[in-house]
Each structure stands twice: as C-alpha cells, then as structure tokens.
Amino acid sequence: MRRRKFIKNVLFTSGAGVLGSQLGCSPQIIQDENALQVESTGIVSEPARDIPVIAETDVLVIGGGPAGIAAAVSASRAGASTILVERYNHLGGLWTGGLVLPLLSTHAVDQSRTRRKVIYGIGDEIAQRLKNMDMAIHEINPIVDPEAAKYVLEVMIRDSGVDMLYHCWASNVLVENKKIKAVFLESKSGRVAILPKMVIDCTGDGDILHLAGENFTNLKYHIGLVHRLGNIDRVDETKPGFEKRNIGEPTPIPSVNWVNMYGEEDQDGIDLRTLSRLQQKYRIDIWERTEKIKSTPGYEQVYLLDTASQLGVRASRILDGEYTLTLEDSMTYKKFEDCIGISGAWTSMLYQGKKIPPEKRPLWQIPYRSLLPRKTDNLLVAGRCFSFEEKLVEDTRIIGTCLVTGHGAGAAAAVAAASKTTAGNVDINRVQALLKKQKAWLG
Amino acid sequence: MKLQPRHIRYFSLGAAVLTALPVSAGVFTGLHLWLSPFILLNSALALKTLVLFNIFGIAVLIAALVKDRWFCRYLCPTGILCDITSKLAGKNPARITLPRVNKSLAAVSLLLSLFGIPILAILDPVNAFYNFLRILSPALPAVLLINVSGLILILFLNVISPGSWCGRVCPLGGLQLLLTSARQALKQRKESGAVYTPGRRHLLTGLLGGGVGLSYMFFARRLQAAPLFRPPGSLPEDQLKSTCIRCGNCLKACPTEIIKSAFDPGDPAGILAPELDFSLSYCLPECTSCGDVCPSGAITAFTEQQKKQLFVGTVEINLAKCLLTHNRECNQCKLSCAYDAIEIASSDMESTAIPEVKASRCVGCAACKIVCPPGAIEIKPLPGNSSRSGIS
C-alpha cells in the first residue's frame, strides 16, 4: 500500500534556483526561461514536495475555450477517457467569458468562386444548437449570446462524458523521455497532478507548450476588455439634444449590445504586470465611458450590464511547430495531405498588392503538422497558439479557427492514445476518418 | 552560310520584339533600349551620372566609333522596318526630299541635354519601336494612340520618301555619323591640320532645336499642373518631364500595375510621363523595378533600403469612417505598413484606439489605403513638387 502510494506520487520541484543541480537527467522539469520576466526583487527557493496524483487519463485538455471544448468533446466521443481543465468558472473562454461574441470565419470562397460555409464538425454543432435556441444572429459569422453558449457547451461536455475540472490552473509539467508524464494543477485542494497519455494545449497563451520546453514566439498584440450595455431598446432618438453615441453591436437579446474594445497595442499578454494594469485601466474606462453615454439625451436608460470576466488577450505565445502555416497557404488553396480542418476569413487582407475582401477570400486547409510541437511526443497545440506566421494572425486567433484546430487535435489525441503511439507517429488517415465521422469537413 | 549583318539584325529585331512586349521581365524589362547610344548620351549628359546597364550603350558607342553606323547595321529594329517599307514603296521615285538634319538633330539634342533638357531623346528610333509594341498591352487607353504614332510616322516618312528617315532624319543615325566625322576629323587633323567647320544647315537646325528647347523651358514648363503621384526615385518634376523618353519600361515592369501614362492636356510637358494610380493597388515596399528598368534616368535607380526615404504621397485617415472609432476590430492599416508608419494609439475619444500616421516614416505607398476595409484612408500627392526624395 505504501509502495503503491509512493508510485502514485510524483516528485515535484519548483525552486528555479536549485533545478539545475538537482535534476541533471530525466525526469525533469523544464527550466522556465521566461518565468523571471516579471520584475523581481530577489529569488526564493521553494522546497520539493510530493504531489498527489488525482487521475490518469488518455487525453488531458488544458483550457476550456472554443479549442478545448472541441478537443475534449471529440476525444471523449471517440472513446478516450478525457479530462478538461478550466481556470475560470465557465466554458467558452474568450467567446463567452471574454464576451467576444462573433463566431468569425464560418464562410469563405471555394475554388469554384462560391462563398460557402466551411466550419463543420463540433464547432458547427455548437453553432446550430445556439441557432435553434434563437441565441445566434446572422447566418455568416453569427453573434451568439454568451450565457446560452456557456449552457450549450456545458451540456455537450457533460453528455459526451468529459471529466470536467473547473477552478484550477495548470502550473507545470513533468517531462520524461520527451513525454509529458504529469501535468500539475493549482487548485483549492492544493497542488495536484494528472498523468496523461496525451496532452492538448488549449490555453490560448501556450502555457503548456512553454512549460514543456517547446520553442515559441511571443506575439504582442492588442489587449482589450469587452463589455455589454443593457436597455438599448430604450434609447430615445427623438429626444431633443440627441446625438448618436457609440453603443456597440446587437446581440441575440434585443435590449443588449456588446461593445468591443481594441485596446492598447503591442501589449504582452503573458506579463503579470501588463495584465493587471490593463484590467484596472479598462474597468475604470468602461464605467466612465458608460456614464458619458448615459448623460447624453436619449441614452438615460442605458446601463452597463457587465464587463467581460476575461481580459481580451488576442495573441501571445505562438508555437514553432512542425509546420508553420502561412498567409500564402491561406490565399492559394494550398492542399495538405494531413488536413484536419478548414477555416474561413472575416476581414480584408492584402495579398500580392491587391486587397482581397472577406467575401472573396479563399477557404484554407489546416495541416495536422501545424498543431504538432517539435520536441514533445505526447503534446498537441490547438487554439490561437498553434503554429502560423504572424501575417495570418487575424484569421488564426478567432473563434472559428479555434473550434477547427481544437476538433482536429482532439481526434488526433484520441487516435494516438488508443493506438499507443506518439502525436508525431499517429496514423493521419485514421484521424481524418474519425474527423469525418464526427462531421468535420476536410475539403 | 556566312553570318551577315542582316542576320544579326533579324536576331536583334526578334530580341527587340521580345523585350518590348508589354510584360515584365524583371530588371531585364526593355533591355534593348539600353543599347541605344543616343539615349545613353542624352541622359548621361543631362544627369551627369551613369548606371550599370549603361555599359550596353557604352559598348555600342565604342563600336560605332570604330565602325560607321554600327548600331544601324546590326541592332536597329526600326531600321529593318524602314528598309522593308522603303522596298514596298519601291520604284516610286521619292516624292519629297527631306533635308539632311540627322547630325544637327543629334548635336542639338546633346547640347540641350547638357543644359538639363534632354527632350529630343524621345526621337530615338528604338524608343519609337518600343512605344509601338505597347499596342499589345492588355489595357488600351486612348493615350496609347500617341505612343504608337511615332513608329507609324517614321514608316509613313519612308513610304513618301524612301530611306529618308534612316539616311536624313534619325538622330541616332546622326549621332553615329557625328562619331564617324569626329574620327575622320581627328585623322585629317593629324594629316593636314584642317579644322571641321559647321555649315549653314547645321546652324539652322541648331537654331530650330535651341528654339524648341527654349520654348519648352518658357512655355510648357510654366503651366502649373495638378500635382500627381510619381514613381519613387523620380527626378524633380521639371526634370522628370524633360528626361523621361516615354518608353513605357516602368509601366511594364511594375508588378502591381500602378504606373500609368499621365495625360493632362493642361500639362503638355508632362504628357505620357509616368504617374502612379492607387485606385486598385499600391507600391510594393520590396520592389525597385521602375528604377531598375528606366533607361533615361528619369526614375533614378534605388535600393529597397533607399526606398524608405522616397516619398510619393502623404496619408490622410478619415477617423469618422475608421472602424476603430466604431468599436470595430481592425488594424489592417498597421499590419499592411512595411514602413512602421502607423500606430494604433490610445485616444481619449469614445473609442479606445485610433490609427496615427508617423509622417517622417510614411512614404505614401498606399498599402493602407488599399486594404482599409471601410475606405477611410486617402493618399494625397505631395504639394507643389510631386516627388520628394530623402536621398541626398
């Protein structure tokens, strides 16, 4: 009994200063080169501790945003035991908790120059459910209600048998022989460990790929904070002194608008101080901005319904994967043998000197290799941190593409776990067959 | 079979046709024009500079110095066409005899060039040939009529007076005759000490050419034309108009097809000179083609690095139209800017971010104007002088 308990415990050392001397060979915690980016006044060593293992699983998905949900549902439905870890109290990530309500890039132009729907599979299933509930508006790039989406996602996760863990944060990994042996979670129950066969990094910020020692670039981009306004239907345009104010865009609920914020540019989405400063600034800005709107004749009834519970980090760590998807690929109908999904376009792009508006932009295939890290055998990356060139960021960081990459990674992880192979050696034909069975569209 | 001059001439004609086709061949676009020593000397005298491809013209110049009318014998594509039309006109005796002005024309042209107005370089026969083949352009603007008329006029001249273009008018031929004369004069001077004296005919053409040059300076240049966008590296406005030989090389070489022939009747001196049209595309930051292929030097050759200092216009953003002021998500202008000239800055307006242009970096390439989803960006020509170079 003692012995079994010992095996079930994994030695965990987190003191950055003593790592090198104590752990020269595997198993090892990868040196965290960027951990000390934050301004520090000194260093303190944390003693080594034994961490209880709370589960072993085929597939461990970190992050319950659009990518994580698609991944977890796909893997679990394929028969893999699946755990989904989420740090907040809801599913949907920035789509719901971030109040970034549009499901962008659902459509694009095919080779016969017809604009068509491109996102199918689990992402489309979610969209259809919301549409049937009258909780999505617009056929192309629908805007959804966040609470309805949270509900739908919750039901899908429950019904597909995923073991859901809320309120915990993946804080480290243990890599042994190029494999992530354990993922450590910080929770109200203390630090716990999960032993996975396959790990899917759906953190958006690439937390896991970073902890596993993969190479990445940190893309600094705009960070904003979305909010919603209520009583929009009570705006009185006939009132004397009325002048048009910016009150955002409609949502499925007639009295509610969502107001996007682009926010400051070149912000570091993985810097503690940046996130804290912006959070504070934006919260105050939004309240004061709304007060100004309310003081305009005709807008007296409008009120601040809510600010997003998640700060809108649009991009941060981007994986340096086996294949880096390019803007050129997305503009030239590039075909990939290992295609795991197709995404569309929502904004104009410059290509070869010409402006290509969204209604003329080609659909683009996503290869499995762009989800595949170079070093770790049992890790896949989905969501806005998969491997693409910076020029493509407008199309890769959005909800639609996250749903597609998530679905692809989930199916691949399930196949890899079942066939006891690495992510790199997985039989792509089987993955594609599973994706098609799960109604994904691969062209 | 012995290789004869005409074989080389036919080969040259083929090469001229190929390089004159209205398609881009990179830096080799319009290569044949660089062979003309007439264009070479005019632009070299006007600009007092040489570029790498001038080496072709210099080689021909040396050949023509050694061998009489070497260019006409071996390389001139227009010459072949003239011979053919002369033969077709055939036995009809010449109805008109044109005065022999070729040498004077060449001399006057070079003299004008020396004073910075190489406007007669436009009479180069290879240039006329090139302009004619622009009839094969996919787009056929009305101004193309002027382009093609040069060669038609030359050939017409040969019908009414066979052989007269090549023998009496062509300034490129005249230039080569001057070279021959110079060689002979040198030789004679060694032998007899005789001095070459210009005749009355030369004086007349000289006066005529001088008159053209002066009237160009006093009248055509004086007209104030609306400012246009000129290709990066263009000479200052007046110089551009007089130096450009309207060969069309830059139009063909431009990968985004934004270079057009200007046509403003209010600006006769600038007719058919290159202007930029930003309605459909923009000036690619990595492209140096128009400067590379310009045989007259009207567009100074420039490097990608130098291009960052070659200003063609200024950007104006209409914030009322900008998506950011409507809380919509967009940074296409910033993404498209290869010169880091656009920042999305925080503002105290109702929106939290608006684009700002750094004028010192913005060259006016128009990438942002083209991509801007709501069309909120305008490019304005530079005031007064419509091209400005930061290269010292």
Image (spheres, coloured by chain):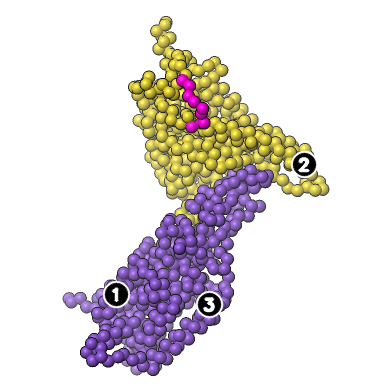
* Label 3: which secondary element: loop
Could you tell me which quadrant the C terminus of chain A lies in?
top left
Q: Residues within 10 Å of mark 3 (few under 14, many from 20)?
A: some
Left/right of residue A147 with respect to residue A422 in the rendered view: right
| Inter-mark Cα distance, 1 to 2 | 80 Å
Magenta span of residues = A37-45
Q: Residue at x 68, y 33 (%)?
A: A306
User: Which numbered mark, 1 or 3, is in the foreground of this view?
Assistant: 3
Question: Could you say which is closer to the camera, residue A42 or residue A254?
Answer: A42
Q: Is residue B65 magenta?
A: no
Q: Residues within 10 Å of mark 2 (few under 14, many from 20)?
A: few
Q: Main secondary structure of the magenta part?
A: loop
Of the chain colours in the picture, the one used for chain B is purple
Give the chain letter at badge 1: B
Q: Residue at x 42, y 57 (%)?
A: B304
Question: Could you say which is closer to the camera, residue A335 or residue A308?
Answer: A308
Specify which label sits upstream in the sequence, 1 or 3: 1
Q: Residues within 10 Å of mark 1 (few under 14, many from 20)?
A: some
Q: Which residue is mark 2?
A: A295
Query: Which quadrant of the view contains residue B208?
Result: bottom left
Q: Which residue is mark 1?
A: B60
Image disc number at residue A63: none
Question: Could you say which is closer to the camera, residue B57 or residue A194?
Answer: B57
Query: Which quadrant of the view contains residue B300?
Result: bottom left
- What's under tag 1, amino acid-wise? Val
User: Which numbered mark, 2 or 3, is in the foreground of this view?
Assistant: 3
Can residue B39 be spotted in the picture? Answer: no
Q: Residue at x 52, y 43 (%)?
A: A394
Q: Which residue is mark 3?
A: B221
Query: Which quadrant of the view contains residue A17?
Result: top left
| Inter-mark Cα distance, 1 to 3 | 33 Å
